[in-house]
Amino acid sequence: MTDGYLCGWRVRSELDLPELAPWTGPDIAPDLIFRFGETPTQLDDVIERTPFVQVGRSGACLLTHPGVATYHMTGPDEVVMSRNTDATEAEVRLFLLGSVLGYLCHRRGLFPFHASCVSINGRAVAFSGPSGAGKSTTAVSLAQRGHPLLADDITAIDASGPGAPIMYPAFPRLKLWQDSLDSAGIGSEGLERNRPGMSKFHYRHHEEFAAAATPLAAIFMLQKAGPGLDEQITRLERPVEIISTISSEVFRPRIGKAMGRRPSLLAAQAKIASTVPVYRLVRPFDLAAMDGWLEQVEAIVGG
């Protein structure tokens, strides 16, 4: 079993995780163990509950995805998985490296930001926005232009140090719809489907992936152009607007607060807002017109 790298942590997993780069750091004990085993249906001392998530007073977290798996985060260093017999490995990995990763960031003191991320000139650039705004499409297009992928969906940021915030790369895999693959000139043949029957695929781009802490250079909030909303890139200037924008894309803040993270989440938002430039990028619907505004992004961050 080869240990993998995930957000700065050494991970040992009974589930094969081809998305992860191999661990090449010091020979230390694993930071995280992912294993199969029995999971409860109910946590003791539940202090926060949603239809699919329970948080216990100890910080334990139970996440249930019907038809796929139940994930029991017993503490900051272990996730126990019970897999549905009909679930594919891709489905089990999908939620482990998605929602569970976000909860682990909360539990282990990182700031989980809902964004895809690439490296431009050795600095992390995050792309956030609502579902369908084009986060993954933007990231794969930049990867095609030679900028390594760092994360998809969950960008793990450490804003607790004395210097500028840093980003810990997760893995160089994106979840892409067929039209995004087509616009990037990538064929879907041989790619793993996100879930059975979906026209969404897992695209891995391991070239030049750097498993090392990376300074966070910029955040771009994506929107699609439309009536009354012209294509443009503008830097946000008002602190209240910047903090509000960052706050809107924190991964499951309610769960984080139940884990006792409210003060550190607020401190991280303030630190990022005061040290990292945040831009609003209003992009065209036409994916064929991407090169023009991707060049603007590269110019802004020094590409």
Image: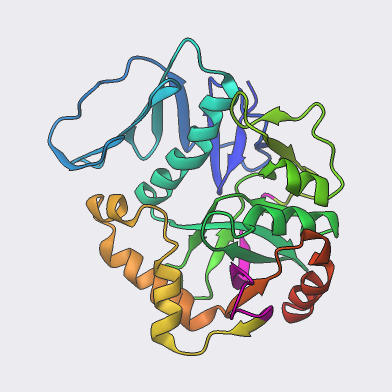
Q: Residue at x 41, y 66 (%)?
A: 248
Q: Is residue 253 positioned above or below 53 on the image?
A: below
Task: Tell me residue 52's x, y (percent).
Answer: 31, 34
**Which stretch is magenta?**
211-232
Quadrant of the drawing holding the C terminus = bottom right
Count of labels shown? 0
Q: Residue at x 44, y 47 (%)?
A: 102
Residue reaching furthest to the front? 227
Q: Is residue 283 positioned above or below 49 on the image?
A: below
Quadrant of the drawing holding the N terminus = top right
Q: Quadrant of residue 70?
A: top left
Q: Is residue 298 positioned above or below 114 on the image?
A: below
Q: How is the image coloured?
A: rainbow
Q: Quadrant of residue 302?
A: bottom right
Task: Tell me residue 141's x, y (percent).
Answer: 78, 57
Q: Quadrant of residue 176?
A: top right
Residue reaching furthest to the left? 45
Q: Residue at x 25, y 41 (%)?
A: 50
Residue 225 located within the stretch drawn in magenta: yes
Task: Tell me residue 38's x, y (percent).
Answer: 33, 14
The answer to whether one can see residue 29 in this image is: no
Q: Is residue 59 positioned above or below 238 on the image?
A: above
Q: Nearer the viewer, residue 49 or 34?
A: 49
Task: Tell me residue 293's x, y (percent).
Answer: 77, 73
Left or right side of 134 for 238:
left
The answer to whether one can see residue 219 in this image is: yes
Residue 224 located within the stretch drawn in magenta: yes
Left or right side of 299 for 123:
left
